[in-house]
Image (spheres, grey):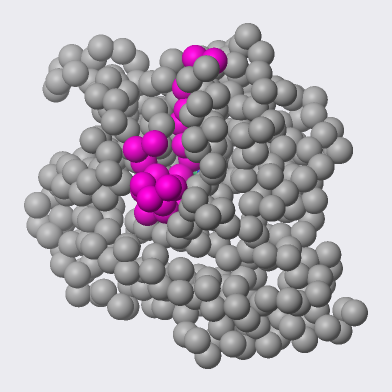
């Protein structure tokens, strides 16, 4: 299926066509070996991806949400525990916490980077706090050093949600080896995407890796022995094969995203009413999304759509105001920076295969829409 818009937000078809032979070979090879669940292709990917992240272990699972639930569980998070995270993220972050019977405790974001603000951790610490889940949203890592220091001081576990940040660097290191565990999603549209659902837990901790490895496969120790009740959250062999073929190109794709982001940065400088998301000098983001903030966001979104340009909102309703989390009793006004971001953010088209010509079109239309509003 071709993208619905002349300029789409992302273009998976273009990516497939750019390395079609490799992907078809990977797919066919798995069919010939019939390694459909886990197996050699998944093992090979686990090894390569751990190495890519600079970590010791990678355990492939069925999706990113499961990865987070399993990683938190492996860290000892259980019913009644409090887990600190942000409300400016995809629902899966808090859903995984909630599904363990633990309580998501939302802290407000840094108004410039739109990421977890480590300075606010103290304000929500209680005797029930067990873990922190920093979210590397849009592909930019959270300022991890103060988070890790705080966690060490208070005996907390840290599990990073890097579902949007494959390959992103914090102080020169790739995310995946900074904390107790890091989770990734390989949802098709992510920087590294499978052809269906897939996810992974990456860690330097052998006991976390070993526990997740059993838990994803019915608590299995060997073919017939089950040490505990786990679940079925295994990665498909076909997905392992596709991911392994795509991983070889991830660095190049991320470089292209960085180039496109730099072009947007320079072209969108000094436009009244348009605010770019700040990037910390400690970080090298991988630009899963290129996000700007606008007061008249909804009008601009519609204006772009009318000119056949797809844009997105990530995310329009902060999690503390979602019906799913009404049970937490949070209300409008609790997280002012988060709520303002939700009202103003707009994701512009950005993907490795995007042409300069199309990028120029997006900027021209965007500028005219902003000018018309003034
Ligand atoms: C995509 C995503 C997830 C969930 O991953 P799935 O593979 O879709 O389960 C979790 N957190 C964030 C920030 C995401 O973007």
Relative to 45, say whether 304 is above or below.
below
Residue 94: percent from left, percent from top: 59, 33
Residue 365 located left or right of residue 4: right
Q: Is residue 21 magenta?
A: no
Dividing the picture into quarters, in which one does residue 303 lie?
bottom right
The single residue placed furthest to the right in the displayed view is 374
Q: Is residue 173 magenta?
A: yes
Residue 87 shows in the view: yes
> Measuring 80% from the left and 51% from the top, which residue is drawn there?
340
Q: Main secondary structure of the magenta part?
A: loop
Residue 369 located left or right of residue 163: right
Q: How many marks?
A: 0
Relative to 23, say whether 110 is above or below.
above
Residue 287: percent from left, percent from top: 50, 62
Residue 142: percent from left, percent from top: 54, 43
> Measuring 85% from the left and 38% from the top, which residue is drawn there?
332
As rendered, which of 280 and 297 lies closer to the eye? 280
> Measuring 72% from the left and 23% from the top, which residue is drawn there?
123
The single residue placed furthest to the bottom in the displayed view is 357
Q: Which residues are magenta?
A: 154-178
Residue 22: percent from left, percent from top: 19, 70
Image quarter hosting the C terminus: bottom right
> Measuring 60% from the left and 78% from the top, which residue is drawn there?
266
Image quarter hosting the N terminus: bottom left
As rendered, which of 178 and 317 lies closer to the eye? 178
């Amino acid at each position: 299926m071709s993208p619905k818009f002349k300029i789409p937000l992302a273009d998976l078809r273009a990516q497939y066509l750019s390395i079609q032979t490799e992907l078809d070979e990977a797919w066919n090879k798995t069919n010939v070996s019939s390694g459909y669940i886990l197996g050699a292709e998944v093992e090979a990917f686990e090894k390569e991806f751990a190495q890519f992240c600079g970590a010791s272990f990678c355990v492939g699972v069925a999706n990113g949400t499961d990865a987070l639930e399993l990683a938190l569980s492996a860290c000892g998070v259980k019913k009644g525990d409090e887990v600190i995270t942000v409300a400016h993220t995809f629902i899966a972050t808090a859903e995984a916490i909630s599904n363990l019977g633990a309580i998501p405790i939302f802290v407000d974001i840094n108004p410039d980077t739109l990421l977890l603000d480590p300075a606010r951790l103290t304000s929500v610490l209680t005797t029930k706090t067990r873990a922190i889940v920093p979210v590397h949203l849009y592909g930019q890592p959270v300022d991890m050093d103060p988070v890790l220091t705080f966690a060490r001081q208070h005996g907390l576990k840290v599990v990073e949600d890097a579902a949007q940040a494959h390959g992103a660097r914090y102080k020169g290191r790739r995310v995946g080896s900074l904390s107790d565990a890091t989770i990734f999603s390989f949802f098709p549209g992510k920087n590294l995407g499978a052809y269906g659902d897939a996810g992974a837990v990456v860690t330097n901790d052998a006991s976390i890796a070993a526990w997740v490895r059993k838990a994803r496969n019915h608590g299995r120790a060997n073919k017939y022995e089950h040490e505990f009740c786990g679940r079925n959250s295994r990665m498909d062999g076909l997905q392992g094969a596709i991911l392994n073929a795509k991983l070889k190109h991830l660095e190049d794709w991320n470089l292209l995203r960085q180039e496109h982001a730099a072009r947007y940065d320079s072209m969108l400088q000094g436009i009244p009413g348009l605010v770019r998301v700040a990037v910390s000098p400690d970080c090298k983001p991988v630009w899963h999304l290129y996000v700007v903030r606008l007061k008249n966001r909804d009008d601009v979104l519609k204006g772009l759509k009318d000119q056949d340009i797809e844009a997105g909102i990530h995310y329009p309703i902060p999690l503390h105001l979602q019906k799913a989390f009404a049970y937490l009793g949070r209300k409008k006004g609790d997280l002012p920076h988060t709520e303002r971001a939700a009202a103003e953010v707009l994701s512009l088209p950005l993907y490795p295969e995007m042409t300069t010509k199309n990028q120029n079109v997006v900027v021209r239309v965007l500028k005219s829409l902003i000018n018309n509003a003034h």
